[in-house]
Image: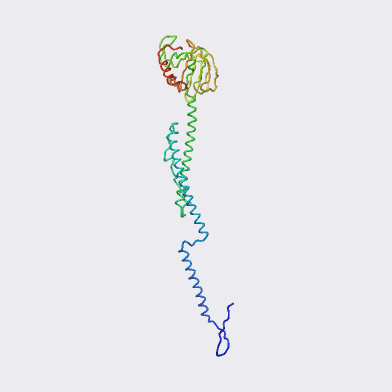
């Protein structure tokens, strides 16, 4: 409620009420509004042009933004380190592991390829730090893809290693008769004199002279496909399928130590030296087949002979003499 104001009238010797004019009252109101507006406008201009004036919420958001930039910077440094490690692993993978197992190297462009087609980073656009976020995300995606490619490569190498190990175990790689039990190598692979007809005949295996009953060893892992005497000239004989196209044959045995269908390991005793079939004296006739073709067994004794012993076996096997079967 507005206060009523009076003044003293000396002529009437009394107090008179002060009456305010309507126009003046309105002017005062308008002046007050205008002053308030101008003051607010000036304060707004000052607020907008003085950056150090921040609200608590703006200060919190600014700290959060600075922390985000710091974290993205640290993340990029870690990715630099990871990329260096990945590059080293990829180099060893291509030039050692895959090379050793005869697998083609993975091209660099396949390992580091980006992602074509649609803009997969569209949702990251329109922000103050969109470039930083997009580049970091893109690096992370490419690094993830490189990890996937490398993981698949190592799976392939592991599979090749397993297959290579199985191949090395399967290939006939030792003498079927040990040197301790061996009297001599009677005949090698090649043209030899037939002991019965006395004419030149191609000898497709190697003859190991040893006493009757001397152990005969499987020269590689495999499965026994034959253990019988139903093949002309070989007498009691064993055939082992080693897989990968390799088969070994052991002829003129005294008796068997395995049966058809049995799995054997390199070094297992499969039979004993004899003189059954077309044979002149106790010995083992040994042959190797590769893809059904007979090949020289002399090339497959690296598993249990020293270089000196191999040279001696090679020299004896090359002598043109009479075979024992």
| Image quarter in which the N terminus is found | bottom right
The picture places residue 171, in percent across and down from the top left corner, at: 47, 24
- The residue most toward the right is 1
Residue 220 drawn above or below residue 146: above
* Pick the front one: 183 or 176: 183
The picture places residue 73, in percent across and down from the top left corner, at: 46, 49
What colour scheme has been applied to the protein in the rendered image? rainbow
The picture places residue 20, in percent across and down from the top left corner, at: 54, 81
- The quarter holding residue 203 reads top left
- The quarter holding residue 190 reads top left
Left or right: where 94 falls relative to 23: left
* Pick the front one: 325 or 67: 67
**Image label count:** 0
The picture places residue 283, in percent across and down from the top left corner, at: 48, 13
* Pick the front one: 196 or 189: 189
């Amino acid at each position: 409620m507005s206060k009523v104001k009076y003044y003293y009238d000396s002529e009437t010797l009394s107090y008179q009420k002060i009456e305010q004019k309507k126009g003046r009252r309105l002017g005062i109101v308008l002046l007050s509004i205008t002053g308030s507006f101008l003051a607010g406008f000036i304060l707004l201009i000052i607020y907008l042009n003085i950056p150090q004036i921040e609200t608590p919420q703006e200060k919190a958001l600014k700290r959060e933004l600075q922390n985000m930039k710091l974290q993205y910077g640290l993340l990029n440094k870690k990715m630099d380190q990871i990329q260096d490690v990945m590059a080293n692993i990829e180099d060893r993978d291509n030039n050692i592991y895959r090379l050793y197992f005869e697998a083609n190297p993975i091209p660099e462009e396949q390992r580091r390829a980006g992602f074509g087609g649609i803009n997969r980073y569209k949702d990251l656009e329109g922000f103050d730090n969109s470039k930083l976020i997009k580049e970091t995300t893109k690096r992370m995606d490419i690094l993830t893809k490189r990890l996937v490619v490398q993981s698949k490569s190592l799976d392939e190498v592991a599979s090749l290693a397993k297959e290579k190990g199985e191949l090395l175990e399967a290939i006939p790689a030792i003498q079927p008769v040990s040197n301790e039990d061996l009297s001599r190598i009677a005949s090698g692979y090649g043209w030899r004199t037939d002991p019965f007809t006395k004419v030149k005949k191609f000898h497709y295996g190697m003859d190991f002279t040893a006493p009757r009953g001397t152990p005969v060893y499987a020269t590689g892992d495999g499965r026994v496909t034959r253990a019988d005497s139903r093949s002309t000239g070989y007498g009691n004989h064993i055939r082992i399928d080693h897989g990968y196209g390799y088969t070994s044959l052991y002829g003129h045995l005294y008796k068997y130590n395995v049966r058809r269908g049995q799995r054997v390991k390199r070094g297992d005793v499969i039979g004993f030296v004899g003189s059954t079939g077309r044979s002149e004296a106790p010995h083992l006739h040994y042959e190797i087949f590769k893809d059904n073709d007979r090949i020289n067994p002399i090339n497959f004794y690296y598993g249990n002979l020293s270089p000196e012993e191999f040279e001696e076996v090679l020299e004896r096997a090359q002598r043109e003499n009479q075979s024992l079967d």
